[in-house]
Image (spheres, rainbow, N blue to C red):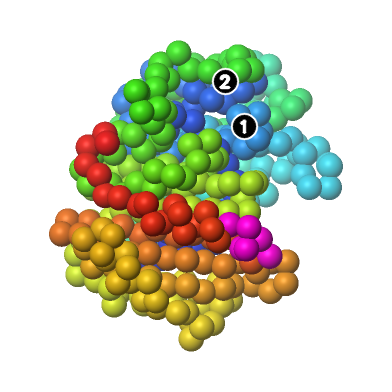
């Protein structure tokens, strides 16, 4: 549990700016996108998209509690130097995307690459490459297969990841059919979804509108903020991260079940470890300066932490609030560019002073 909390802190530090659509589906992707008909109902989803739906996009579905994961990704077809990426770059793409998406380092020599798959090229009329590799060890080992389709404007990556010792539980022919029946679609530029209806309070379109049980809301935070990440799993963990002004300000809310690894002392240890890992000084963290005020506001014990990481134009200021309820621990983290802190300080005070705990679809 402590590792997962630490991962939440790291994510807010090293995020890539994305915006997610309503109800964590891919309804707001604009332009050319890929769909996989016939997939069963997912147990949870993760969706990110840049540039108001028109940029890079990532949509992951988890099945059977994460035993099987299937994701679709749309990335630019050129590298940062403007050079076109080709099937010959497949190994490099696998390494980079696994590091970016899963924080997993892979040795390129351990990736089995096929730079041309004629059967799939006939279906999609574009160059297709595949990659096979494993990640993790022992009970955490997963078998992975990637399909890269190289179009003129985009590269599409379809990624399948399956727990290694559960492979016999899945029908290989059925999964093969998924890949052979994938199709390109050209989404309406408006990105509108027919089933995105707002409730009377105008909040049904929020990604967190369907969170079950106790949840922490910051009602004054702008509804049009870009959603970097929204996930909710069967264990009760929820992550909801939004950004303003192209990432100048990032707000994350994380819920995890309460337990021995989520005490105030353990959370402080996780914060200190995360700060140290990211190049900061744990001795400079100011703990509990506002803990009593938030405990009075929310009627539960609270912990706060404030710190800064980075130098010069790279410096960022962090504010953290942990709320310890009977069944859950909520972590709220605000990240702002240090040189823009003054323009957000009044709004931060307003947002946080109106936080509230709610139940159901609130």
| Up/down of 298 relative to 91, above or below | below
In the rendered image, the quadrant that contains the N terminus is bottom left
Position in image of residue 200 (x %, y %): 34, 23
Residue name at image x 36 percent, y 38 percent: 208
Q: Can I make out residue 235 in this image?
A: yes
**Which secondary structure dominates the residues rendered in magenta?**
helix
Marks 1 & 2, CB-CB < 8 Å contact:
yes
Position in image of residue 349 (x %, y %): 47, 59
Position in image of residue 25 (x %, y %): 44, 28
Position in image of residue 61 (x %, y %): 40, 34
Which label belongs to residue 52? 1
| Up/down of 348 relative to 303, above or below | above
Describe residue 122's horizontal placement relative to residue 215 as left or right: right
Assign a secondary structure to mark 2.
loop
Residue 53 inside the magenta-drawn segment: no
Describe residue 271's horizontal placement relative to residue 107 as left or right: left
Q: Nearer the viewer, residue 154 or 176?
A: 154
* Magenta residue span: 339-344
Q: Can I make out residue 67 in this image?
A: no
Dot 1: within a 10 Å radius of its alpha carbon, few (fewer than 14), some, or many (20 or more) residues? some
Which label belongs to residue 191? 2
| N-terminal label among 1 and 2 | 1
Q: Nearer the viewer, residue 151 or 204?
A: 204
Residue 343 inside the magenta-drawn segment: yes
Residue name at image x 48 percent, y 37 percent: 223
């Amino acid at each position: 549990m402590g590792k997962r909390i630490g991962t939440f802190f790291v994510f807010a530090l090293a995020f890539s700016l994305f915006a997610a659509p309503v109800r964590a589906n891919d309804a707001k992707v604009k332009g050319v996108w890929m769909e996989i008909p016939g997939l069963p109902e997912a147990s949870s989803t993760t969706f990110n998209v840049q540039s108001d739906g028109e940029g890079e996009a990532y949509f992951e579905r988890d099945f059977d509690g994460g035993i099987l994961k299937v994701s679709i990704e749309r990335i630019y077809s050129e590298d940062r130097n403007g050079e076109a990426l080709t099937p010959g770059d497949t190994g490099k793409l696998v390494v980079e995307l696994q590091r970016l998406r899963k924080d997993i380092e892979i040795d390129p020599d351990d990736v089995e690459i096929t730079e041309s798959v004629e059967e799939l090229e006939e279906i999609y009329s574009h160059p297709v490459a595949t990659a096979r590799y494993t990640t993790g060890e022992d009970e955490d080992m997963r078998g992975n297969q990637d399909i890269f389709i190289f179009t003129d404007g985009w590269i599409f990556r379809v990624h399948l990841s399956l727990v290694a010792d559960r492979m016999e539980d899945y029908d290989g022919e059925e999964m093969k059919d998924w890949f052979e029946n994938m199709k390109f679609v050209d989404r309406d530029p408006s990105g509108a979804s027919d089933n995105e209806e707002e409730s009377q309070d105008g909040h049904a379109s929020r990604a967190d509108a369907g969170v079950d049980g106790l949840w922490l809301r910051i009602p004054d935070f702008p509804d049009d903020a870009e959603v970097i990440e929204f996930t909710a799993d069967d264990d009760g963990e929820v992550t909801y991260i939004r950004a303003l002004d192209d990432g100048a300000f990032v707000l994350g809310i994380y819920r995890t079940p309460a337990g021995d690894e989520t005490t105030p002392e353990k959370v402080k240890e996780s914060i200190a470890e995360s700060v140290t890992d990211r190049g900061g000084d744990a001795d400079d963290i100011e703990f509990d300066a506002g803990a009593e005020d938030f405990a009075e506001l929310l009627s539960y014990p609270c912990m706060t932490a404030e710190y800064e990481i980075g130098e010069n134009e790279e410096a960022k200021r962090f504010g953290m609030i942990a709320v310890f309820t009977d069944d859950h621990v909520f972590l709220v983290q605000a990240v702002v560019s240090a040189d823009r802190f003054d323009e957000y300080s009044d709004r931060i005070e307003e947002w946080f002073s109106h936080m509230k705990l709610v139940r159901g679809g609130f």
